[in-house]
C-alpha cells in the first residue's frame, strides 16, 4: 500500500537516487578548499628529498649525501647536481664548504 510522501521526503529520496551529490560529478562535489589547484606552487620530489636529508643530518649535509637521498639507486648523472642545487636555493640552504651545505 503506497504512502503519501511530503515534499521534503521526496527531495531526500531524489538526492539518494542521484548519489547524494545533487547531480554533480564527484570532482565538483568536493569542498572548494580540498580541490587541487595547479596554479599554486608545489614542492617537487628533489626539493622534498633535500629537505628530508637536511632534517635527518641536523642541517649539515654533503652533496654526495644529497644525491643519494634525491636519486637513490641511480647512476650519477651530471644534471643531478644542478637539480639539487636549484632545490637547495629554494630551501634557503647555503654552501659552507666544498660540497657541504647547511640551513643554519
Image (cartoon, rainbow, N blue to C red):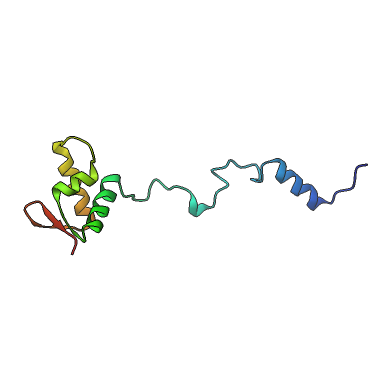
Q: Residue at x 11, y 54 (%)?
A: 100
Query: On the rendered image, what quadrant is the N terminus found in?
Result: top right
**Of 55 and 95, the residue lying toward us:** 55
Q: Position of residue 38 (x, y in %)?
A: 39, 45
Q: Residue at x 29, y 45 (%)?
A: 45
Q: Position of residue 81 (x, y in %)?
A: 15, 43
Q: Residue at x 49, y 52 (%)?
A: 34
**Of 13 and 46, the residue lying toward us:** 46
Q: Taking 99 as reference, is 67 left or right?
A: right
**Of 60 and 6, the residue lying toward us:** 60
Q: Residue at x 29, y 50 (%)?
A: 48
Query: On the rendered image, what quadrant is the C terminus found in?
Result: bottom left
Q: Position of residue 15 (x, y in %)?
A: 71, 45
Q: Residue furthest right?
A: 1
Considering only vertical position in the picture, is 82 above or below 94?
above
Q: Taking 43 as reference, is 67 left or right?
A: left
Q: Residue furthest bottom?
A: 104
Q: Position of residue 52 (x, y in %)?
A: 27, 53
Amino acid at each position: 500500500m503506497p504512502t503519501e510522501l511530503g515534499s521534503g521526503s521526496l527531495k531526500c529520496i531524489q538526492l539518494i537516487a542521484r548519489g547524494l551529490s545533487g547531480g554533480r560529478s564527484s570532482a565538483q562535489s568536493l569542498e572548494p578548499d580540498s580541490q587541487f589547484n595547479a596554479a599554486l606552487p608545489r614542492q617537487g620530489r628533489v626539493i622534498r628529498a633535500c629537505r628530508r636529508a637536511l632534517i635527518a643530518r641536523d642541517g649539515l649535509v654533503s652533496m654526495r649525501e644529497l644525491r643519494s637521498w634525491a636519486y637513490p639507486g641511480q647512476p650519477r648523472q651530471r644534471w643531478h647536481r644542478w637539480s639539487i642545487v636549484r632545490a637547495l636555493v629554494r630551501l634557503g640552504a647555503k654552501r659552507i664548504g666544498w660540497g657541504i651545505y647547511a640551513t643554519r
